[in-house]
Image (tube, rainbow, N blue to C red):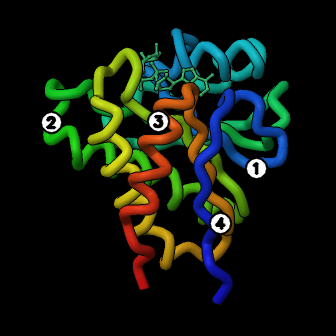
Amino acid sequence: MTQVAIECVQGNIANQPDIDAIVNAANARLMPGSGVAGAIHSAAGPGLAEECRDLAPIEPGQAVISGGHNLPNARVIHCLGPVYGVDTPSEELLADCYRNALGLADREGLSSIAFPAISTGVFGYPIEEAAEVAVAAIRKASPGLTSVRLIRLVLFSDDDLAVFRSALAATPPET
Ligand code: AR6
């Protein structure tokens, strides 16, 4: 079977035109916010918030899918990450976000997905811990994917990129 490629890049999650679905680090109401949610909603236009009204609210760890509206991507997968140390166990809930988003993308027949570093901004998850959880969850889910062939992690800063790259290098692929 073809391997799933996992890559880390520095960039803006709302500017990944070669990807089928981008993941939103959402709030429970799936409304525009700051950070990732702000960038995605402003690039998608008001139609995204309108569609999201019927999908909300969501729980920590959950993922739901919408259209991409004015984004270059066909779909947006909205995940509610845990607020670090408040929504517990934070590690499990953060892993659930990655696992559930990948499962949704795969069931929808999508071949590529891009994630931001969920929960590491406003929700306060330390970047090193979040990188370990994200990479472990992605490695674990990858062998079960039949449609998704590219998983991209999009980090906002060079420092965060370095942390995710070393977490990825430190974790062997599951067989
Ligand atoms: N592209 C990629 N990464 C980004 C971008 C971007 N355009 N903007 C910020 N980041 P956050 P959370 C990084 O706060 O912690 C919102 O208000 C950022 O540096 O967007 O899950 C929602 O409405 C950080 O590393 O998401 C929720 O209420 C990471 O993306 C709440 O914040 C996540 O930062 C969600 O908080």
Residue type at mark 4 is Val
Q: Residue furthest bottom?
A: 1
Which residue is drawn at the image coordinates 39% and 42% (left, top)?
62
Q: Quadrant of residue 131?
A: top left
- Alpha-carbon distance for marks 4 and 1? 10 Å
Would residue 161 appear left or right of 167 to someone viewing this image?
A: right
Q: Earlier in the sequence, mark 4 or mark 3?
A: 3
Mark 4 lies on a secondary structure that is loop
Is there any visible trace of residue 165 in the rendered image?
Answer: yes
Identify the residue under disc 4: 148
Q: Where residue 77 sits: x, y (%)?
A: 58, 41
Is there any visible trace of residue 28 in the rendered image?
Answer: no
Mark 2 lies on a secondary structure that is loop
| Residue contact between numbered discs 3 and 2, judged by CB atoms under 8 Å | no
- The label shown at residue 20 is 1
Which residue is drawn at the image coordinates 51% and 61% (left, top)?
103
Residue type at mark 2 is Thr
Q: Where residue 95 sits: x, y (%)?
A: 33, 50
Would residue 15 appear left or right of 153 to someone viewing this image?
A: right
Look at the picture and state if 7 lies above or below 73: below
Mark 1 lies on a secondary structure that is loop
| Residue contact between numbered discs 4 and 2, judged by CB atoms under 8 Å | no
Question: Which mark is in front, 4 or 3?
Answer: 3
